[in-house]
Amino acid sequence: MLRLFYVSVVVFLLSLQSHGDEPTSVGLEDMAKTLRGDVRLIVMGDSFSTPLWRRVPMASMLSWPIPKITALCGGAPQSGQFVNASAACSPVESLLWSDEEKYRIFRSTEKSQFFSFPVRGVQEVYTDNSFASGADGRLFAFRFDDAEMHFGVHGPFTEVGDQIRLRMMYLASPDPYNTSVEELEVRDLNTHTAFINLHHHARGYWHLGEDPNTVTRDVIPMQINAINQDFPAVLDLENTLRVRLLETNYLSGTNKYLHIAGGLYYHTDESEQRIPGFYFSQLSDDGWRYDGFGCNALPENVFDKKFTEEQFTHWLDVTTLDRNQPVVFYWYFSSEQLPYSLLVEKIEAMIDQANLSATRVGLIEWQHLLVLPHMYKMGAYGDSPEAHAWMLENKNAMIDIATQRGNVCYASIYDATGGVVFDGTQAGNNWLEENGFTNFEYGDLTMDLVHGEPLGDLLDNFDSHPDSTVAGAFYAAVLGNLIREAGCRADLVPDGIINTLDLLKIISGWEQTGESDINNDGTTDIHDLLILIESWGDCWPVQSPFNTPKIRECIFLTRPSISITTRGWFV
């Protein structure tokens, strides 16, 4: 069907003129309280949200005021991410988009099969005659890298004396009993912990009516499984929390597959129960689009990026520590160049698919956070009016979905940063300087983003992704400030803490309109005072420049007038 989708200069220029009046967020009123409590955050997206510290979702753990990060779940790449599975054996194949063979699985067989579920990534071993294990039969070592966290608001994930456990995820082959490795040994660093049977000692599934705390079951083919027990990771607390996997019998020449698919580190108390707090997890890889998260389909070729609801349900099930823990699905993609109607259709499809899986697993409470990213140069469109028009389409779709759905909220980094591309040019540097980012703080670090490194250039060589941890922390802090503004209504003197400074603001504005009129009923009175008292204490503490008046002015730079010709698309 051919439909014309027109982008006119009138619409674009009007959108610029009304920039300050459009919402930077919808439905975020309770998000500050949610994220600082007992919550699981599941990041879903493309290369904008891959588990790297320079990406905005990961950097959120550096610049957000999270009291206690208690769990972290990732895929099983050999290196480069916060959860790794470094290989001591060889050869090893990696199933992820950046690999030459992408998501092709069972690579030692002639038949082409694909597993594109975006855990980023899965490690594949085939134990033919070329296979060799490492010293003492070592295969893999799960490792955790929290080096960047040491300087952030939260600080390191672990300290001496903590009780940490690891849950190991693995993928089963279509005929696991005949074609996959059966038994492994687990060691906490160098100390024996357990022998595990990958065929018959899998963790039970809530969505199948089983209690994972008591049920041990046979593995489910072509799904993400977990071992029926979690393992201590306490003998390497001062380094990388290494937990090793070893062969129990000589595997070379047995022609079996082994697929390591992820690890979940979490804090426990003395009775080995999880400690409540912030649980970060992710499903993302390079080049994914909205459609892949909501199409409920298997990949058909090496370039397909899609997965089924069944695959997501299995992964969500085995990575859930507590079904009573609230969940926030944090959707963070680069914007898609699609008309409004298709954007709504695809975004709602991915939300619906996640809702179905959450229901099947038996989660008690969950919501969705749609985030419009920073402005970046969109390939051939660059930073043109057409590129901004595409951002506007994505924005309108997200706002309408968040407005119409009770468990969906929205935030716009794009609007909170004035739609500016921070590529080191004068326009971006002016915005940073005028909004106080010559003194940007997160955790123990203080950065001048304009005159010091990175000289206002926060993006990579394609002017697309944040190119450093500092850049990621900047955008994450901008998002965090939107959360503060929406959720901390009584924070009249902006610092994220409701205290005597805010009380004095109420007193000075008594029986007047203005900022002190928290509930916007036309006058500052006892109702506003009660709101302040109820909110007393930490809400969402922020650092410079968000605790200064300038950032609240939200300065938007004026763009030159640019004409756009109308265009049509096949839809």
Image: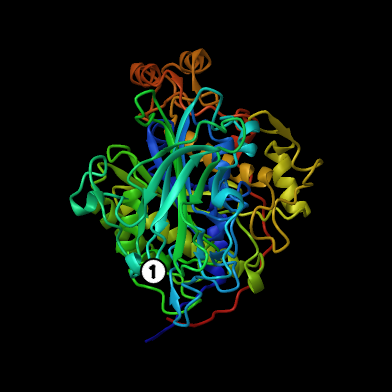
Name the residue: 72% across, 32% down: 446
Q: Residue 265 location, x and y as percent?
A: 46, 40
Q: Is residue 238 left or right of residue 407?
A: right
Q: Can residue 545 be seen in this view?
A: no
State left or right for residue 134 relative to residue 271: right
Towards the viewer: 64 or 226: 226
Q: Quadrant of residue 404?
A: bottom left
The picture places residue 460, in percent across and down from the top left corner, at: 70, 58
Relative to the observer, which residue lies in front, 16 or 570? 570
Residue 89 visible in the snapshot: yes
Residue at the limit of the structure toward the front, as seen here: 250
In what quadrant of the picture does the N terminus appear? bottom left
Q: Which secondary structure, mark 1?
A: helix
448 or 256: which is nearer to us?
Answer: 256
The furthest residue to the right: 451
Tell me if 201 is positioned left or right of 52 in this view. left
Identify residue for label 1. 179
